[in-house]
Image (cartoon, coloured by chain):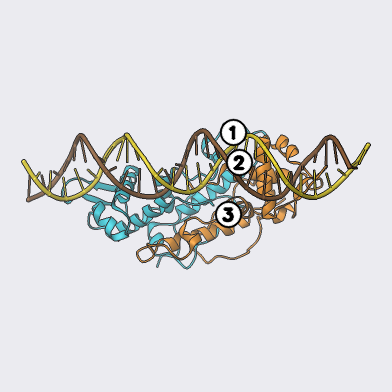
Chain colours: A cyan, B orange, C yellow, D brown
Amino acid sequence: MLRISRLTDYGTLILVYLASRQDRLCSASDVAAAVHIALPTVQKLLKLIAASGLVQSERGTDGGYCLSRPPESISAADILDALEGPVAITECSIEDGHCHLEASCGVGSAWQKISKSMRISLENVSLIDLGSPPASFPVIDVTTPVQPGSQTAAHRS
Amino acid sequence: MLRISRLTDYGTLILVYLASRQDRLCSASDVAAAVHIALPTVQKLLKLIAASGLVQSERGTDGGYCLSRPPESISAADILDALEGPVAITECSIEDGHCHLEASCGVGSAWQKISKSMRISLENVSLIDLGSPPASFPVIDVTTPVQPGSQTAAHRS
DNA sequence: CTATATTGGACTAAAATGGTCCTATATTCA
DNA sequence: TGAATATAGGACCATTTTAGTCCAATATAG
């Protein structure tokens, strides 16, 4: 169903929470209590997210996690990259080469291109948007040339 | 990874093939030979697709399958609906109600809205587009009000 | 030295996925 | 009627992915 995993969903919650606590360092326990997700799961996710560079960590007493960039500059695509690997709609589109159907296919490339458009659109959704979503999100136009880094979500208040 | 399943990918291939054979009825064996996918798998997929109404079937000698609508009117969203259930980016967005995080969440709705935009954009990609993709597909704008049935892919020659 | 944290990994149960196969039924034609 | 060809509707299984928990090691502060 073109869906993201539940862990990615949780990860988003965690990041949104950290965005609201930009100043302080939050321990995994703090986060778990705030977002109402079991501690072990939060720990696992924070480790993953930290490994991707989206958050920074500090060990020891009074240690914890915080965003390593301002929330405006963290996109939905960044989150997917961190928790699910690169956004790719088909297996073809990640392996990019050895598909035993290539000759008769002609479809792979379409899904690939759709995937690229979606990725770009997700790059335009920031952590702030995810925390306080607009009335609705714009529609992907999958038929005209993509504009690489157009601009970030335009609804910001 | 925001990906579609391999079976859905295969299903797309099959539908694109049927679109090129609009006139005749194609048996599962015909299709399997044409798209280079194992017969049992093709049979399974055709049954699923037929159940969804995208293709019509006829039994008996000289029976087979054909599209039940012109390929222009079959969208990528239709294919996903047929083979993976409704396009929904999060589990939340399908159950639409009982999420034990609802209080602290605020994120679910953002992903839900993004999902809706993506769905609409996929509705604008036809089977013809999937068969002969344009140079690139437009980018989803996830920040402005959605336009329900705007128009179908504009690159058609 | 002890408390508190993260780090990095192993581990398990449950579910989804991909794929095959079998029986029943419908249709055509000789 | 009977044989051949198709779909219909399942069951079934192996493998992978997902979600979730837990443990030993390390770093930090007091």
- Return the x and y of residue A39 as percentages of the image width and height: 28, 52
Subunit ID for the residue under disc 3:
B
User: Of residues C12 and B58, which is closer to you in this image?
Assistant: C12
Specify the amino acid type for callout 2.
Answer: Gly
Badge 1: few (under 14), some or many (20 or more) residues near its Cα, within 10 Å? few
Left or right of A85 on screen, residue B20: right
- Return the x and y of residue C29 as percentages of the image width and height: 91, 40
User: Of residues B104 and A138, which is closer to you in this image?
Assistant: B104
Mark 2 touches mark 1? (CB < 8 Å): yes
Of labels 2 and 1, earlier in sequence is 1
Dot 2 and dot 1 within a common chain: yes
Instruction: Tell me the mark number nearer the camera, choosing from 2 and 3.
Output: 3
Residue in view at x 83 percent, y 42 percent = B61
Residue in view at x 54 percent, y 56 percent = B118
Specify the amino acid type for callout 1.
Answer: Cys
Which type of secondary structure does the marked residue at label 3 adopt? loop
Left or right of B44 on screen, residue A27: left
Q: Which residue is mark 3?
A: B85
Residue in view at x 24 percent, y 54 percent = A29
Q: Which residue is mark 1?
A: A99
Displayed quadrant of residue C30: top right
